[in-house]
Amino acid sequence: MCENRWVNKPAGFCHSGFFVKYVVKLNNCRKNRRNYIWEKNMRTDTIAAIATALSDSGIGIIRVSGEDAIPIVHKIYRNKKNQEVLSDYKSHTIHYGFIIEKNGNLIDEVMVSVMKSPHSYTTENTVEINCHGGALMMKKILMTVIEAGARLAEPGEFTKRAFLNGRMDLSRAEAVMDMIHAKNQFALRASIRQLRGSVFDKIKELRKKILYEIAFIESALDDPEHISLDGYTERLSDQVCYLVKEINRLLNSADDGKMLKEGIRTVIVGKPNVGKSSLLNLLVGQDRAIVTDVAGTTRDTLEETVTLGDITLNVYDTAGIRNTEDVVEKIGVEKAKTISEDADLILYVMDTSIPVDENDKNILWMIKDKKVIILLNKSDLDEVVDQSSVDALLLEVTKKSGSLYGLSGIKCEEEKEQDDNIQMIRISAKENEGLDTLADLIKKMFFHGQISYDDEVCITSSRHKEALLEALDSMNQVRFSLENDMPEDFYSIDLMNAYASLGRIIGEEVEDDLVNEIFSKFCMGK
């Protein structure tokens, strides 16, 4: 009878009680792991750092966190009623006063915020000193706090303490830094959704379903008299299909999400003096690269981050590619070829006022397997090269390579799948024409013509993607075991591996060295 009740009862139910015991055992293991990481990584002394940018500004904030944060700041804080004790203030209140040196000299007029444990960012007693901005002033107050008993915080240590103290999971902690470094609206909104728990909630949902199956199998193996596995493989197969589908859905968002967050690696290539540097200056909005009529002016690579609407491009301007005997220029050409190999997108600039030559063929051969936008530049001048002549050149190159690229005319079925890899538009870098068309075309090539801001979970972290791939591999192993009627122990082992892989995303199965690596990338004061 018990096996029939498993299908309809919620997770956590079992007549024998083995299920509950197993879940408790797993939860205790998870708590022990977190406690181990906490003990190895956590220093319970009071830390302090400048939480705002170290530059001249109207306001600067020095953040102090730890058990002794309030008494330490009290040593250097004075207000009009000197008999008041800072610890007597209510939590989440702000107070006017002064920061004083040991010798009694006044340093600055400040507002002091008091946040008492556990209701603070780190869950510890926290005090924030709001002082006048300016690097010298903030440094002086920070040194005064340190002399009073605090120590200088390590990069990311405030958020690290928030994670280790259970204030937030690891995905939320990473979202904090993503929010600070957001380059565009998509990255900002994705990090806000992640900070609000979009990734955490989805991963917890998947892990809960996996845990249910692990506990059922283990309980059935421990107590076969009360829990039968007859017919269970069909139900598990349906659950595995659902989990694989959901993990794949998250993975499908990963490439677009990472590219939107970090930017599309874009390389500008072309022959010398076709307008590559002019295009870079147009994209950047200022004269970043030297532009002359002398071919071969650009000898080295220039890198800039450019935002086109919702899209961020990490743009590399390269030396003109041609056969040359100039030693320095030859180095630049080789560097351009090397950078192009790792590009997500190639912007191939062609000067329509001069005929194509062997150098154009060599460049097209080099970029034939990449996503390419051919920019027919200098459309304001008399045209010598048009789209049909470039199509003919492409056909000549791709016939030699065995590819099926083409840009005009009737295409066979094999070609249709690859059409989006090479596109062509007219621009004039000199007349500032064609950028809107370029942005729309990039959206079409990489994001199917639109960028979504909906509330669906979007994976933007390489670490999360790696863990999802490992989880997917484990779930596929479960599927293989089911298809081959293997013993139930095999299901349990692979389900546990998937459970652990997903746990690394939110920090419930994370190792201490990974914790250190993640938070070392944070900025000071956060």
Image (cartoon, grey):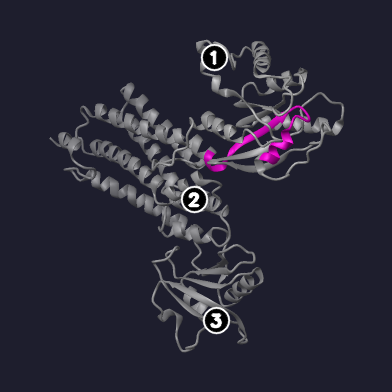
N-term-proximal mark, 2 vs 3: 3
The label on residue 174 is 2
* Vertical position of residue 321 compared to residue 174: above or below: above
Q: Is residue 462 above or below residue 327?
A: below
Q: Residue type at mark 1: give it.
A: Glu
Q: Which residue is mark 1?
A: 415
Could you tell me if the residues under marks 1 and 2 are in contact, i.e. CB atoms within 8 Å? Answer: no
Is residue 73 shown to the viewer in this render? yes
What secondary structure is marked by label 2?
Answer: helix
User: Which-is-in-front pick, marks 2 and 3?
Assistant: 3
Viewer-closest of 357 and 315: 357
Which sits earlier in the primary sequence, circle 3 or circle 1? 3
Q: Which mark is residue 323?
A: none
Magenta region: 260-282
Badge 3 is on which residue?
98
| Quadrant in which the N terminus is drawn | top left
Residue at the far left in the pictured view: 1
Q: Which residue is painted at 38% across and 50% down in the image?
A: 30
Question: In the image, 258: left or right of 377?
Answer: left
Spatial CA span between label 2 and label 3: 35 Å
Tell me, yes or no, whether the two marked residues, 3 and 1, touch with CB atoms within 8 Å: no
Q: Nearer the viewer, residue 76 or 506?
A: 76
Callout 2: 10 Å neighbours few (<14), some, many (20+)? many
- Alpha carbon separation for disc pair 3 and 1: 73 Å
Three-letter residue code for mark 2: Glu
SS at mark 1 in the image: helix
Which of the two residues, 98 or 155, is positioned nearer the viewer here? Answer: 98
Of marks 1 and 2, the one in the foreground: 1
The answer to whether 179 is drawn above or below residue 356 in the figure is below
**Rendered location of residue 487, percent (x, y):** 31, 28
The residue tagged with tag 3: helix, strand or loop?
strand
- Residue 492, given in percent of the width and then of the height, sits at 33, 35
